[in-house]
Structure formats: structure tokens, C-alpha cells
Image: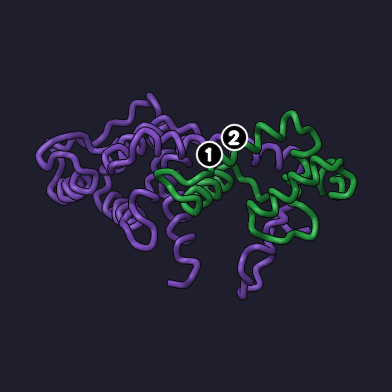
Chain colours: A purple, B green
Amino acid sequence: MTGDDRWYEAAFVVGITNALNVVADGLGAAVMPAVDPATAPPDVATVFADIRAFYGTAPGGGEVPRPFGVIAHDAAYLADVWAAVKHAFTERRLTRRVKTALAFAVSLTTRSAFGTAFHLSELRRLGVGEGGIREIIGVTQMFSSYTKIADTLQLCSDMADIAPVDPTGVPDAGAG
Amino acid sequence: MPTVRLRDASEYPEPARRLFELSRQWFAYDFKEPPAMSRVMAWDPHFGGPHGRAMKRAMAPGEFSRGEKEMVAAAVSGANACTY
């Protein structure tokens, strides 16, 4: 890990959140049966139990979030996706509260009905008050305005000077 | 390339230049020219004024810190595929 570790953590949260949302929202009302936790084979049931524990739902019951249920027909794939999700959201340099706020903001931005509702529920479960939730909504709203203004006018980033020197030599896509 | 000519700070009237100073303080950075977005917003103070106040209100520390909110803003910008 380097000084950039917070940003790597944030990027992984954003990416895997979008991956879950794509499956949950993209499939929508399509007939795509999820694995029933009550009849799941042992290896899937083990992952489901871990998912429930991570999200604080009752060990013996409660729903498994839809994107996991849908992909659970392949137990090995489910296990790997879940391992990535769990690792991304586990508290390290960024708190789980901040990671969930990022997931909520990204879900709201991408109009994910599943992700917005799911991470809103998670924020509340993690103790974020209604005021804090409104703060994230406000930031999401304002920067959804700035970004579109910037894109419409095709503005080039002028914030690069603020960032520390990047030793990798990777070109700045916003420069020029 | 921007689709408009971004005016230099010196081309703006005095009230706008005072806002640029506030922008410099907000970012705590001495830009050679005010950020492009600040200059865009100053083009129409009747839009940029309230928009900027709403942004500062949204970004003020509360349950989440300014730093945490900047990270949320970066994630939203990324989700909107905005390089600015």
C-alpha cells in the first residue's frame, strides 16, 4: 500500500458496486431465478451465511441481496465475487461508513434502484443519520451538475497542479 | 479543447474577481488563473452565485468531513465519466 491506498480502496468500491448494480438493475424483471437460500447446496449456503453476517441480517433467514442470489448457480463464481465485494467494503484505510457512502453516491448517480436502496439501508444500519444521508445526496447532486457543465463545455482539468507529483509518468487524460 | 473561450480573471468585473479570491481560499491553492469552473460560473453570477453557495453548503463538514465529501465528489465525477 502507498499514499494512494485510500483512492485504490475507493476505486474498488465504486467498481464492484457498479458490477452488482448492473446485474440487479440490468436484469430487472427478467425471469432469472435466484438460488433459494433454503435449498442452496452447502458451498453456496456457506457463502450466503457470510453475506448475511456481513450485512447484519439474521443468520438463519433474511434475504440474500439479489445480485448474489442470481449468480449463485455457479458456486465458485459466487465465492470469488463475494470475496471481492467483502474485501472492497472491509474497513481498512477507509471506514466501512465512507465506503458505503461512496457506494450510495455512485448508485444514485447511475440511477441504480437496487444500489440506491441497498446502500441507503446500509448507511442507516451503520448509524449514519438522516442529516448525513442528505449530505451525501447534496454532494452527489452538486457534482452531477458540475460534471455536466464541465463536459458540455469540454473543460480541461486544471486541478492537476494540486495533486502530488505522480512518479508513474502516466499521462493526465485531462491535461492540455 | 473547451467549446467556449474562457476569459482571464482580469477580464471579469471586480465583484467576480472577489469571488475568485474566495475560490482560491476554498481550494487553499494559488492558481495562476482561477479554476476553469470558477471562471465559467462567474460568467453568469445569477446562476454561479447560488450554485456555488449550494456547493459550499453541501461540502461543509457535518456527519461527513470535507475530505470524505471530496472523495464522494470524485466518485460521482468518475461515475459520470467526467475527466475535469
Horizontal placement of B63 versus A168: left or right? left
Horizontal placement of A86 versus A62: left or right? right
A155, B12: nearer the viewer = B12
Horizontal placement of A19 versus B29: left or right? left
| On-image quarter of the N terminus of chain A | bottom left
A79, A32: nearer the viewer = A79
- Residue indicated by mark 2: B54
Write the residue at 40% across / 39% down.
A132
- Residue indicated by mark 1: B58
**Mark 1: few/some/many CA within 10 Å (<14, 14-19, 20+):** many
Write the residue at 72% across / 30% down.
B47
In space, the residues marked 2 and 1 are separated at their CA atoms by 6 Å
Q: Amino acid at mark 2?
A: Ala
Chain under disc 1: B
Callouts 2 and 1 on one subunit: yes
The quadrant in which residue B27 appears is bottom right
Q: Are marks 2 and 1 in contact (CB under 8 Å)?
A: yes
Write the residue at 90% across / 45% down.
B11
Outermost residue toward the bottom in this view: A167
Horizontal placement of B12 versus A76: left or right? right
Chain under disc 2: B
| On-image quarter of the C terminus of chain A | bottom right
What is the x, y in percent for residue A51? 23, 46
Which element is circle 2 on?
Answer: helix
Is residue A161 in sight in this rendering? yes
What is the x, y in percent for residue A145? 63, 35
B40, A63: nearer the viewer = B40
Q: Amino acid at mark 1?
A: Ala
Which element is circle 1 on?
Answer: helix
